[in-house]
Image (cartoon, rainbow, N blue to C red):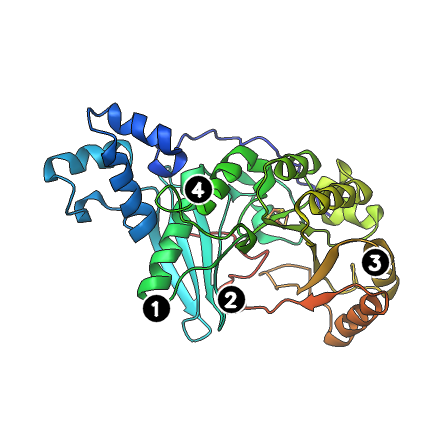
Amino acid sequence: MTSLPLVFDSPRPGKPPVHLADLDEPGRRAAVGALGLPGFRADQLSRHYFGRFETDPEQMSDLPAALRDQVRATVLPQLLTEVRTLETDSGTTRKTLWRLHDGALVESVLMRYPDRITVCVSSQAGCGMACPFCATGQGGLTRNLSAAEIVDQVVAAARVSRDRFGGRLSNVVFMGMGEPLANYPRVSTALHRLTDPAPAGLGLSQRALTVSTVGVVPAIGKLAAEGLNVTLAVSLHAPDDELRDNLVPVNTRWKVAEVLAAADAYAARTGRRYSIEYAMIRDVNDHGWRADLLGDLLAPRRAHVNLIPLNPTPGSQWDASPKPVEREFVRRLEARGVPVTVRDTRGREIDGACGQLAAAG
Ligand code: SF4
């Protein structure tokens, strides 16, 4: 089904400029100290950035004008340039394409629901995991994002949530471009920045963050040891190794049983149920016997299944399962006592749903 290789190492190391959001509090004080500024300036900049979502030193009226250029050049460089934003669902879904300092393109999607505001962020430009049904995977990996490039997508979303939606950004899902756990150190730093209490970070609830993975087993172990109670989402897409080897090529490294064992260990450490993401692909992984096998695998575990109607991508041979097939899949899982939800397909009209983020400029 696929001939693309798995790529774990960023082919273009591309060093984005260091930014406040890459640094912990001592690091920020050291950075402003290197400019000959007193430590309180670090807290002041943090309050602007994490508390008011202000990224432009020019707008920081309590920062002496003479310092603003220096600050921009050293600790608050512009990381993301908006190329375009598309809206759908009456403006409650917004997909933004960003250009990074080196021209790499990534996307994030902001979704307002009645009870929450969620942003889906990218953790890599492109993706090296080569899943054949996914638009992002077909483009390969361009490079890892820095922690600040990830955080800055969230800060931009928090600003739009406040200014456009009149609300507070509540949830962050790492389900945009890239495999988050293939960029572990930067994603881990970003998770800390997002959950550190203000002004050190954005002060989001750990439980409101979801990290998805195709099953990079060693990194699931590291995340478990990290002490953050974020939600883990495993993109399984097939319950049997034979199919999964093709559908999710990382399975040739870590098999279904190993991935589930790592997720179980995560659940045991955090006390949190994990989710199994399963894209329903017509005649590929939607058979009744696969639902039974998945149900048998998951019945004894602290897992729920999130079925994702596959989003069509242009020119793709992959198609969504028909609704009756999807209903039968749900029925068989529920018959085994496995909780199931079917994800809504918000953003489909603007290619902003899972597996569709290909960042075409
Ligand atoms: S489905 Fe996820 S892990 Fe697989 S290629 Fe696409 S972005 Fe990467």
The answer for how far apart the CA atoms under marks 1 and 2 are is 21 Å
| Comes first in the chain, label 4 or label 2 | 4
Q: Residues within 10 Å of mark 3 (few under 14, many from 20)?
A: some
Q: Amino acid at mark 1?
A: Gly
Q: Residue 18: which quarter of the image?
A: top left
Q: Amino acid at mark 3?
A: Ala
Q: Which mark is residue 299?
A: 3
Report the number of discs.
4
The answer for how far apart the CA atoms under marks 3 and 4 are is 35 Å
Q: Is mark 1 within 8 Å of ligand 1?
A: no
The answer for how far apart the CA atoms under marks 1 and 3 are is 41 Å
The answer for how far apart the CA atoms under marks 3 and 2 are is 32 Å
The answer to whether the residues at label 3 and label 4 have Cβ atoms under 8 Å apart is no
- Judging by the rendered image, the residue that carries numbered circle 1 is 166
Residue 38 left/right relative to 246:
left
Q: Which mark is residue 84?
A: none
- Judging by the rendered image, the residue that carries numbered circle 2 is 347
* Secondary element at tag 4: helix
Residue at image point 67% right, 52% down: 272
Q: Nearer the viewer, mark 1 or mark 2?
A: 1
